[in-house]
């Protein structure tokens, strides 16, 4: 019954490292999203993709980039990890825009030291 | 002022209690409201969806929207320990948007 899978549950990286967070969905959804979740700030949209190779910036794209080479896979890239990027990262997919049929992955807790 | 405000809790209640979880918002254009449940170390999952004002019921859960007060609620009847989770509200003005504004979540503990 797996729908959205994130490659890692926990990651610890060093400041300055390039970090890849991978997300795969098996529902043939057009749209995929990356959020970060922080205490007191809730879920904030980093990037979304509405088609292969297409992307749009969300509310907090600074310090991040994304890649979507295949429909089922959406990667979040931290070009040079910093301690303020320590957070829970959530991937989601949806058949169209954001909908009641959107599903989240289980999250990746990233710690940058 | 945040667009969506939600008390972080934790809210602790005994098993069987009626739970009321709430969000207030500032944008009067919001019409589409969702409630998500997030268990510890898991991603959020959709519980309820409502459009505009009124009530919607699904089993032990009732979602209520009061647009005049810019206030939405999620009621849980006969609460169970398995309801212990963080509950997030989300809302938007446009069903065709990619962006829903999420609340910060309220942590609920139901004590056996």
Image: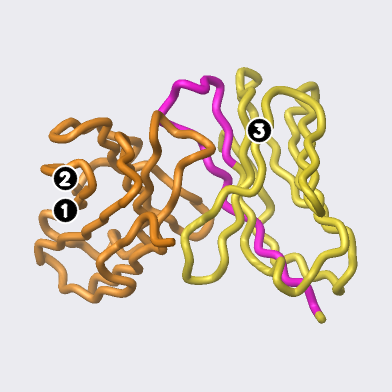
The reply to whether label 2 and label 1 mark residues of one chain is yes
Q: Residue at x 67, y 26 (%)?
A: B51
Name the chain under label 2: A
Marks 2/1 in contact by CB < 8 Å: the verdict is yes
Q: Residue at x 76, y 41 (%)?
A: B63
- Between residues A82 and B15, which one lies in front from this camera angle? B15
Q: Residue at x 54, y 53 (%)?
A: B45
Q: Is residue B77 left or right of residue A100?
A: right
- Between residues A71 and A79, which one lies in front from this camera angle? A71
Helix, strand or loop at disc 1? strand
Judge the density around disc 2: few (<14), some (14-19), many (≥20) Cα neighbours within 10 Å. Answer: some
Give the CA distance from mark 3 to mark 2: 31 Å
Image location of residue A22, percent across then percent down: 21, 58
Name the chain under label 1: A
Disc 2 target residue: A65
**In the image, is residue A36 part of the stretch drawn in magenta?**
no
What span is colored magenta in the figure?
B90-111
Colour displayed for chain A in the image of the structure: orange
Name the chain under label 3: B
Q: Which mark is residue A4?
A: none
User: Looking at the colours in the rendered structure, which chain would you say is drawn in yellow?
Assistant: B
- Between residues A5 and A10, which one lies in front from this camera angle? A5
Q: Which mark is residue A77?
A: 1
Q: Quadrant of the C terminus of chain A?
A: bottom left
- Would residue B25 be visible to someone looking at this image? yes
Image location of residue B112, percent across then percent down: 82, 81
Q: Which mark is residue B25?
A: 3
């Amino acid at each position: 019954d797996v729908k959205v899978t994130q490659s890692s549950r926990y990651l610890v990286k060093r400041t300055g490292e390039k970090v890849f967070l991978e997300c795969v969905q098996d529902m043939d959804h057009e749209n995929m999203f990356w959020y970060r979740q922080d205490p007191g700030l809730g879920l904030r949209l980093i990037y979304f993709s509405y088609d292969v190779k297409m992307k749009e910036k969300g509310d907090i794209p600074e310090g991040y980039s994304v890649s979507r080479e295949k429909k089922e896979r959406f990667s979040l890239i931290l070009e040079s990890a910093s301690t303020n990027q320590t957070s829970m990262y959530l991937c989601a997919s949806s058949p169209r825009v954001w909908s009641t049929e959107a599903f989240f992955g289980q999250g990746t807790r990233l710690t940058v030291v | 002022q945040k667009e969506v405000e939600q008390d972080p809790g934790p809210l602790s209640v005994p098993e069987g209690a009626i739970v009321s979880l709430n969000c207030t918002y500032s944008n009067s254009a919001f019409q589409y409201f969702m409630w998500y449940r997030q268990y510890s170390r898991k991603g959020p999952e959709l519980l309820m969806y409502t459009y505009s004002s009124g009530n919607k019921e699904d089993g032990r859960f009732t979602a209520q929207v009061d647009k005049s007060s810019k206030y939405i609620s999620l009621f849980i009847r006969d609460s169970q320990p398995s309801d212990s989770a963080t509950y997030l509200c989300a809302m938007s003005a446009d069903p065709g948007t990619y962006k829903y504004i999420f609340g910060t979540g309220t942590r609920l503990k139901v004590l056996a």
